[in-house]
Image: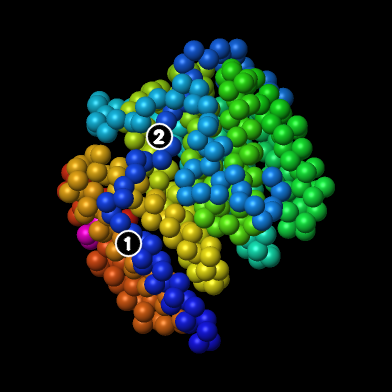
Amino acid sequence: MSVRRNTALALMVALVVAACGNPSATRAPQATGTPSTSGAPMTSGPASAEPSQAASEEPSAAASEEPSAAASEQPTHGASDAPSTEPSTGAGGGDVDSAAADLRTTLDIRLGEHLMLVAKATGAALGGRTEEFDAYGTLLNTNGTELGAMIGSVYGADAEDEFNRIWSAHNGFFVDYTTGVASDDQALADGAVEDLTTIYVPEFTTLIVSATGLPQDAVESLITDHVLQTKAVLDAQASKDWAAAYAATRAAYAHMQMMGDALAGAIVEGDPAAFAGDPDAPAVGLRVALNQLLQEHLYLVSFATGSALGERSGEFMAAGKALNTNGTDLGAAIGQLFGADAEDEFNRIWSAHNGFFVDYTTGVAMGDMAMQDQAVTDLTETYVPEFAAFLAGATGFPKRRYRSSSPSTS
């Protein structure tokens, strides 16, 4: 027990350092480009669509703290500039909360969730954590059916069925690849890559092109890149190159937004009456960028705490570093909106809340209920009021709007 306690404490101290980091080391928000769908030939509207590297000791293609080469060379297909930070106009926030904006946001969130759940499932499988793998596999399946339902709501039951068939198969091919890598079965791994590139990519490309009218070469490129970037995550996980694994995970996660943006734009263009608004409006781009970073924060927290509680120190350190970078990205987005002072205040509060979760995780690892209780108190009585006041002061929204954990008295 003492060894476990000492290990957990050492890991938690490391997370404090990683979470606090250097608030001035800001970067622009990730993945704010929006693949343009303007000018894409629309062969049919949505209503009429009838779609029917192995692990080694060498660093993977993503083995750096910067996005992998595969990510940096993505064709943008007319990607727009980063979203403006000017507030949207019109009643109810204008385009920011339109049906088109909701479609784009939801697609991006669910596609990003797919990537994170894949990374969690394959990491558990490669680490021999069977129960964890099974749980993430169930969540991955649920995510897939939710995506299928979205497709079905636009293009009909046949398209939903075809999406579910292809999507389920591609998940299975990644399971085969992971199994091949874990068992050192090169033939199985190579066969899975062949299935992904010669079955999944062409079939999914055909489905998307026939439904949306997007250019085939652009769609095929996006889907192929998804395969290669996900493979880079698995390869880095298998070789325990955790810095590469988390760099690849962030790059692949950002890439899923490119897929969602392209699909959302085509759906709206094909049926503007059903999806009013402009999905590419600057205010919508800002909404998407913030949602993506906040969703990524939650997943990176769970990666960090899971590896800390599992005493996987190498993975823990890399997850903590990725979490810190995500935090500075969020701080940079706040700074673009409200200025340097607001960015500094955000970074102070955000780092403190990471530290409170560090305390809670340490308390859980040590079986120290008093430490857990104090961390919860710090989160609810220090972080929540401070962050609510900060957001209310910056945005003008009433503080109670951010106190979602407090029961309404109305």
User: Marks 1 and 2: in contact by CB < 8 Å?
Assistant: no
Looking at the image, residue 124 sits to the left or right of residue 285; the answer is right
- Camera-near label (2 vs 1) is 1
Indicate whether residue 113 is drawn in magenta.
Answer: no
In the rendered image, residue 287, in percent from the top left (x then y), is placed at 35, 37
Looking at the image, residue 355 sits to the left or right of residue 69; the answer is left
**Image quadrant in which you'd find residue 192:** top right
Looking at the image, residue 72 sits to the left or right of residue 287; the answer is right
Query: Residue sitting at 40 percent across and 81 percent down?
Result: 369
Q: Which residue is mark 2?
A: 32
Secondary structure under tag 1 reads helix
| Label disc, if present, on residue 377 of the rendered structure | none
Query: Residue sitting at 56 percent across and 46 percent down?
Result: 62
In the rendered image, residue 235, in percent from the top left (x then y), is placed at 65, 51
Looking at the image, residue 313 sits to the left or right of residue 135; the answer is left
Residue numbers of the magenta segment: 384-388
Q: Is residue 387 above or below residue 102?
A: below
Amino acid carrying mark 1 in the image = Cys
Q: Is residue 312 above or below residue 331?
A: below
**Image quadrant in which you'd find residue 218:** top right
Label 2 Cα neighbours within 10 Å, binned few <14 / some 14-19 / many ≥20: many
The colour scheme is: rainbow
